[in-house]
Amino acid sequence: MEADVVVLGGGAAGMAAAALAAAEGLRVILLEKTAQLGGTTATSGGMVWAPGNAKAAAVGLPDSVEAARRYLAQTVPAGQNAAARAAFLAHAAAAIEALERRTALRFMPVASYPDYYPDREGAALGGRVLEPVPFDGATLGRHFALLRPPLPEFMLFGGMMIARADLVHFRNFARSFRSAARVARLIGAYGRQRLAHPRGTTLVLGNALAGRLFYSLLRAGVDFRLNHTAELLLTEEGRVCGVWVGGEAIRARRGVILATGGFSHDPALRAELLPKGARFSAAHSGNSGDGIRLARAAGAALDASGADCAFWTPVSRFTRRDGSEAIFPHTVTDRGKPGSIAVNAAGRRFVNEALSYHEFVRAMLRDAAAQEACFLLCDNRFLRRYGLGPIPPFPFSPKPWQRSGYLISAPDLTVLARALKIEAAALEETVARFNDDARAGIDRAFGRGGDAYQRYLGDPLHRPNPCLAPLETPPFHAIALYAADLGTSAGLATDQDARVLDQGGRPISGLYACGNDMHSVMNGAYPGPGITLGPALTFAYLAVRSLSSASG
């Protein structure tokens, strides 16, 4: 069997590469090892960091590549991939334009979503990050079942996705007629969708991005094959010319693109590259290092330079009703809201809770009393208003979570400390000090709420500091948080065209990598929302541009 391009991996990077290659008139075969398309993207927030994109000006926030370059110079450590990072900055806007013109992807600018270090020179407060336009999953027809669904905990009523802009309406439905009306319309639409589908078909966030790319594959007639795991890269005279899969050789006239999602679930590479405290991953379980292993066997170089080898997030863990193990990423929904506090095993605060999820875990890994686990605490007012992790706010009951042991609740801090095996006096002193600061609106210990990103995570209706409120309404609640990753950042060394490099820094003919299979241009840093998907889509575009000009 033969094609022009063989793509390994059905996440955002792989599907984008396949769709763009098909739009160039090339015959494409996409191989996905699992039973569904979408990868980690399908369960993500779907944000895309695209400096200099043309849409930012539409919301009054024009961006420039030069500003982004200055920002990255202050937030991203130096590495061996300066050319690749420069290529990302130079071509991100063009990649977005090409994807919208040649596929079903559609984006809209996010007017308010600050970079994670908003006080650094060149940072943007909005517009630089894009999100996918909602997508009707029913458009996929019978293929809708082949799109990976979001995490169950990110849906209401067993299958209803909630757009970012609608979260505030669900929180305020009992306080605002406008919000109540909006929620009623959304629930009504969801009910009608469930008459014909196993979950809601109004897709938002990463599921909309994955759904739109899947639809692009169908529309372009891409040959996609699920449950297919490549076993070997075929080479001839130093050139990669195909893959071996299931006892069959599939030849690739132009090249092979690796987009298998990195090594989050590869025990050997985790042991080699990640700290021992980071035992868990919120990435999709199919991201088990396939592309990296195949490329290394063909002589490719692995680049592990930079600050970290993964993109960190704190997670909590529990068992669902169906017996499956769940890992919930605590990215933006609870830690920065007013009235929560994180403490280590000694009952002390160790971090500004409203920092980015990446920086939060960095603090965990630095603190000996938080490396194994820390605790996120709140009072009953917080739980009823904001929820906690996967626990939704009022009117939903927290009792099932208490019965399962996930949520630890107590009538006072002394009893809570005993349940958490923390010294009560230390916890009470920590909370008392925090409460004094919260009432004053100033976090003297860690400066919580001190920049635009932190305030973005807070509650804009809460004064004087949107990130600070005392814990004083019993009962008190706690969940355990663990260090984990959203994906890996170490990966295959590549050049500015996404060509995989060998040990001597030379391109391996016919072999490309994008997404988390390639070493991140952020070198282990996490400077803003969407800094994984932005480069993933950009280097999918650059890989296709390169191989489409190669001789067949």
Image (cartoon, grey):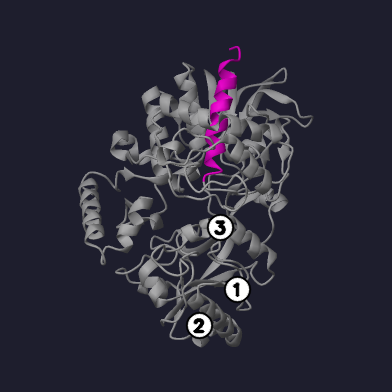
Residue type at numbered disc 3: Tyr
Mark 3 residue element: helix
Residue 298 among magenta residues: no
The residue at the point 66 percent across, 38 percent down is 293
Q: Position of residue 31 (x, y in %)?
A: 50, 31
The crowding category of the residue bearing disc 1, from other C-alpha atoms within 10 Å (few below 14, some 14 to 19, many at least 20), is few
As helix, strand or loop, the secondary structure at mark 1 comes to loop
Q: Which residue is mark 1?
A: 444
Residue 41 in view (yes/no):
yes
Magenta stretch? Answer: 530-552
What's the amino acid at mark 2? Leu
Q: Give the residue pinned by disc 3.
A: 357
| Amino acid of disc 1 | Arg
Whichever of labels 1 and 2 marks the residue nearer the N terminus, that label is: 2
Considering the whole magenta stretch, tell me its main secondary structure. helix
Q: Quadrant of the C terminus?
A: top right
Kindly identify the residue that appears in the image at 40 percent across and 43 percent down.
207
| N-term mark: 3 or 2 | 3
Q: Is residue 199 left or right of residue 276?
A: left
Distance from disc 3 to disc 1, alpha carbons, whole Å, reads 21 Å
